[in-house]
Amino acid sequence: MGICSSKKNPLTILLLGLDEAGKTTLSYKIQNRNSLTIPTIGFNIHTINPLKGVHFNLLDVGGGEKVKVTWNQYYGDAAGILYVVDSSDKERLQEAKEVLHQYIVNCETAANIPIGILANKQDVQNALNKSDLAYELGLHQLTNRKWFLHGVSAKTGDGLLESMKLMSDTIKKRKSKTTLLYKYKNVDLITTIPTFGFKVETVNASKDVKFSIWDVGGGDKIKILWRHYIINASGALSPSEIAERLDLSRLVDRQWFIYGVSALRGDGIHESLNLMTDMFKTKRPLAWYNV
């Protein structure tokens, strides 16, 4: 996915959340416009320039029951997701958590999209602070993706520009495999659709060196297949598979390790000797393997 925004090519940012979380008010406040009080039924698009050098197409999508199920249709073109939560509405926090995880976190088509959680209505008395909200929303479970949490007020405008900068910075810092692949090819047009299977590209690394680069998807259903693309000897078991086949977990009263090597290429041999040396030096049980 491309990570640079410009006036001609603004990045698409999805503005999602439950109905009445304050999404539309927030989007209008960023533009210094008076907000509409009518709930968003489908979606609204606003082109904004909140900071110098930052250009977003802000896609405000409704949060009603019949609209949430269509969110995944917008993920293909999204560079980022802003999920707005009413931090003063404690009765709907569980619902906000379930929607966040069901429709965004656990949706494979959104797996590579950075998420910014905006704790809205921080101006309201007794609104949850960021640390309490992070706990209530189960944000500790977001271990494999880029995300941030920021307190804002759509009413006063506090925190809005900072959240736009955080989103811009998060997108810029995100390192995409597919972007790197296309950069190697010197191709400017980079698809924004996540890799579901794999792509293969042949690149010239130097005058006499060519690589076939396999860009393999990173979704949960694809990761378990990664080992099938690692080729040395055809059908070779991984160290973890060998450990399971040999029932090495039963070796609880002695020192041991298992390490993958290639006698043909020499890969892993020096590392395995270092492991053996360390085991002798420390005189402590060692149960370790490289997957």
Image (cartoon, rainbow, N blue to C red):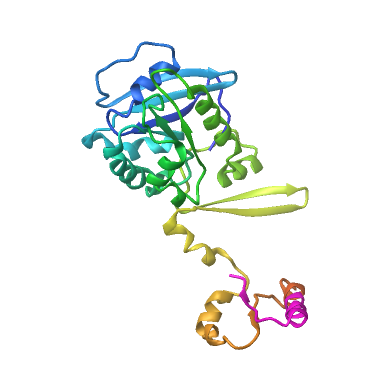
Image quadrant of residue 181?
top right
Give above or below for 130 relative to 20: below
Identified at 42% across, 17% down, the residue is 156
Q: Looking at the picture, how far across and down is residue 139, in whole percent?
A: 44, 46
Give above or below for 157 relative to 265: above
Q: Left of 96 or right of it: where is 195? A: right
The outermost residue toward the front is 126
Give above or below for 12 relative to 210: above
Which of the image's four quarters has the C terminus? bottom right
Identify the magenta region: 273-291
Image quadrant of residue 42?
top left
* Number of dots carrying numbers: 0
Q: Looking at the picture, how far across and down is residue 186, in whole percent?
A: 65, 38
In depth, the one of 145 and 252 nearer the eye is 252
Q: Left of 88 or right of it: where is 156? A: right
Query: Is residue 45 located in the magenta-colored stretch of the structure?
Result: no
In depth, the one of 132 and 218 nearer the eye is 132
Q: Left of 200 or right of it: where is 43? A: left
Image quadrant of residue 271?
bottom right
Give above or below for 177 relative to 191: below
Q: Looking at the picture, how far across and down is residue 94, in whole percent?
A: 30, 44
Identified at 37% across, 43% down, the residue is 104
Query: Is residue 275 located in the magenta-colored stretch of the structure?
Result: yes
- Asked if residue 265 shows in the view, the reply is no
Q: Looking at the picture, how far across and down is residue 132, in whole percent?
A: 42, 42
